Image: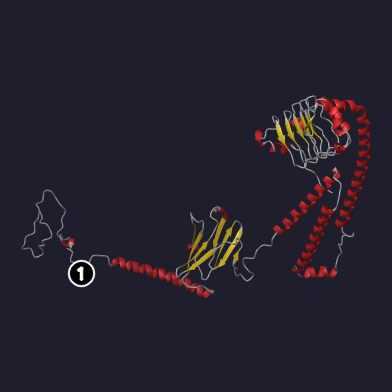
Amino acid sequence: KGWELPLFTEDLIRRNAEHNDCVIFSLEELSLHQQEIERLEHIDKWCRDLKILYLQNNLIGKIENVSKLKKLEYLNLALNNIEKIENLEGCEELAKLDLTVNFIGELSSIKTLKHNIHLKELFLMGNPCATFNHYREFVVATLPQLKWLDGKEIEPSERIKALQDYSVIEPQIREQEKDHCLKRSKLKEEAQRKHQEEDKNEDERSNPGSDGHWYTDINATLSSLESKDHLQAPDMQEYNTKKLDESEDDLEFWNKPCLFTPESRLETLRHMEKQRKNQEKLSEKKKVKPPRILITGNGNALNVNEPKIDFSLNDNEKQIILDLAVYRYMDTSLIDVDVQPTYVRVMIKGKPFQLVLPAEVRPDSSSAKRSQTTGHLVICMPKVGEVITGGQQAFKSMKTTSDKSREQTNARSKHMEKLEVDPSKHSFPDVTNIVQEKKHTPRRRSEPKVIPSEEDPTFEDNPDVPPLI
């Protein structure tokens, strides 16, 4: 009930026309086998130039909407639900027709193929009509243009004999057709009645208050309101019971003997479609998972490795290094890193990896790098000077860190002062005293050069200094 077969749509044809750049109006060959098609529609309007059409292994019950395919040469309708040959008169170029394993019982319907003068090959094996007495002689005599029937060549002598016996064979074929039609009508009525009963039973199982065992237990309802945990046990019990019932029904269906009819083929496909939908529902239920808890109600972080990847943690005096064995070919955009003072969290394709750190780190100074060769993610997290455990200690620790930075700055400045030249402790000449500032006068071209004499008490003769010119 509520089950629908796939429709014969333009999109279906375009998907199977890749060899023609998805252009359908100029298609010459089209393969639509195993598509669960029930009806042939629109094909004579969309694909007028078709020469080869494969429609085997579908659920087509009637040959229709192909009479305008004037260029069609080969039509394959094997393994379908066809019971009568019809509506092929317009296929003027039809040379090969395959109707293997269908349900054709009206053998006299082959007379409609007389208009297909180019028809050379016909396949009817696997049909009820192929079991009739004098089946081959009747077909050979009815279609003089045929060269091959069921893969066997028609000899001229065979055709002559069939034509001679035709007047005797035809009434026998008619009687066998009549018996087949009576059996088919009974099978159709039985299949329809069975289908109605199944729909009725399905409605009873699905409606509350019937014999579907949908009873309300007040105590169970009250207990379920007290705690959500009590909902899981009945749900699991109901789920297991339902799954067991479905498996038993499935086993019963496949072990039940049935006749090979169009109705049984439809029933089988309906059952398979029902099983597929149930499987999809189960998979959807499995996909819905409760959100994973990363932080407890008390604010404590938990260790989580949902991606199930290998990792290593290196803890030294200055920093903590986390090496995650991320997949080599994974795009870095799928990785999100979040470093906190007490834990680190890495989201890999939406799955969390969280690790509580052995010491407190500085998130603002942390870094994350990806290896170009292995793809590993390396997160370096510098440690804090003191472990923060409370509010007052946090303030002291922060103050201590700032004081240390100031002391380092002062020490650096003092060290820079010692770099100045001290003449008393070095043997290098004092370049600043070569010309004193008091006696330094600006140069003038007109004034004579003053050369200090050796009698000047301030003059110091240094052999390393070149003489003044």
Residue at (53%, 60%) from the top-left corner?
A: 325
Residue 126, percent across and down? Answer: 82, 39
Residue at label 1? Answer: 425
**Colouring chosen for the image of the structure:** secondary structure
Q: Say which quarter of the image contains residue 140.
A: top right
Residue in the foreground of this view, choosing between 317 and 397: 317
Q: Is residue 5 left or right of residue 428?
A: right
Residue 254, percent across and down? Answer: 82, 53
Residue 459, percent across and down? Answer: 10, 63
Residue 76 seen in render: yes
Looking at the image, residue 130 lies above or below residue 216: above
Looking at the image, residue 340 lies above or below residue 134: below
Residue at (34%, 69%) from the top-left corner?
A: 411
Looking at the image, residue 359 lies above or below residue 155: below
Helix, strand or loop for disc 1:
helix
Q: Is residue 30 left or right of residue 187?
A: left
Residue 143 seen in render: no
What amino acid does circle 1 point to?
A: Lys
Identity of the residue furthest to the left in this view:
455
